[in-house]
Amino acid sequence: MRYSHGSGLEGWRGGRMARPLAVFLVCCALLAGSALASLSQQAQGDPDVKVVLKRESKPIPYPVVYEFSRTVGQGRVVKKRDGEDGKLIRTYAVTLSSGKPIAQVLLKEERIEPVEALFHMGRMGYPASRGSHTRSQVIEMEATAYEPSAGRGKRATYRTSTGLRAGYGIVAVDPTVIPYGTRLFVEGYGYAIAADTGSAIKGNRIDVCFQTRAEALEWGRRKVKVHIFRERP
């Protein structure tokens, strides 16, 4: 930015100056300066009153992002990058009277963006949409397995309690713990959607669907980490 008398303040944008943005920034600076000057004037006539600067810093938690990768095996999650919190830094002018704050003016706000943590996950599982997912939490659960007919033979509908067709990538959950429609990743199994339930599936239990009874029996019963993803906006 540069200022020349009589021509106004202008800010660069692709080689040209952007007057509206520059004017806005100048107004903000003038308002902050005016407020600080006003506080200083108040302090001049009273020895018990003074103006000090106060700086506050609040962390901005970093998001945890998951992306599909063809180089990562089925049911595996690999951490590719650590995350780093950002910061929101505010500077205030505080008027003190006999050591107690009586007024406060925000002078400056600075935002340092967080660096997201990145995980890669195997593609096998429920048909995945493109793009990334943001993690909500990781839960350790007891996992069992079933096959699409659920042992009903010819009476099987192959439909889940939500109406989706049962198959690999469909998991049964307690909907009070994991709501229907939640996208998740079960370590050792893969990407899935919570779309079914069962009478024995209560609390921190999950039932993963395989295409055959043999695969379900091979899975057995085990403890797994389940990565829960946030709902996309």
Image (cartoon, rainbow, N blue to C red):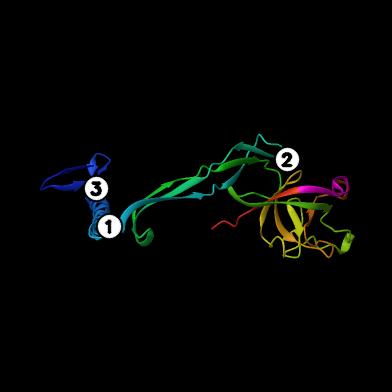
Q: Which of 125 and 188 is in front in this view?
A: 188
Amino acid type, callout 2? Gln
Q: Where is residue 26 in the image (x, y as percent from the top left)?
A: 24, 51
Q: In which quarter of the image is residue 13?
A: top left
Which mark, by number, is residue 18?
Answer: 3
Query: Which residue is tagged 1?
Result: 47
Residue in the picture at 21% in, 46% down: 10
Find the distance from the CA under tag 2 to the CA under tag 1.
Answer: 72 Å
Q: Are marks 2 and 1 in contact (CB under 8 Å)?
A: no
Residue in the picture at 83% in, 48% down: 222
Earlier-in-chain disc, 3 versus 2: 3
Drawn side of residue 59 relative to residue 184, left or right: left
Which mark, by number, is residue 74?
Answer: 2
Q: Does the magenta stretch include residue 217?
A: yes
Q: How crowded is mark 2: few (under 14 residues within 10 Å), some or many (20 or more)?
A: some
Foreground disc of the pair 3, 2:
3
Q: Where is residue 109 in the image (x, y as percent from the top left)?
A: 37, 51
Amino acid type, callout 3? Ala
Q: Is mark 1 on a helix, strand or loop?
A: loop
User: Relative to 39, does residue 168 appear above or below in the rendering?
Assistant: above
Q: Does the magenta stretch include residue 105?
A: no
Find the distance from the CA under tag 3 to the CA under tag 2.
Answer: 52 Å
Earlier-in-chain disc, 3 versus 1: 3
Earlier-in-chain disc, 2 versus 1: 1
Residue in the picture at 24% in, 55% down: 37
Residue range in magenta is: 216-224
Q: Which of 55 and 12 is in front in this view?
A: 55
Q: What element carries label 3?
A: loop
Q: In which quarter of the image is residue 160?
A: bottom right
Drawn side of residue 56 relative to residue 14, left or right: right
Q: Where is residue 67 in the image (x, y as percent from the top left)?
A: 60, 43
Q: Do the residues labelled 3 and 1 touch (CB within 8 Å)?
A: no
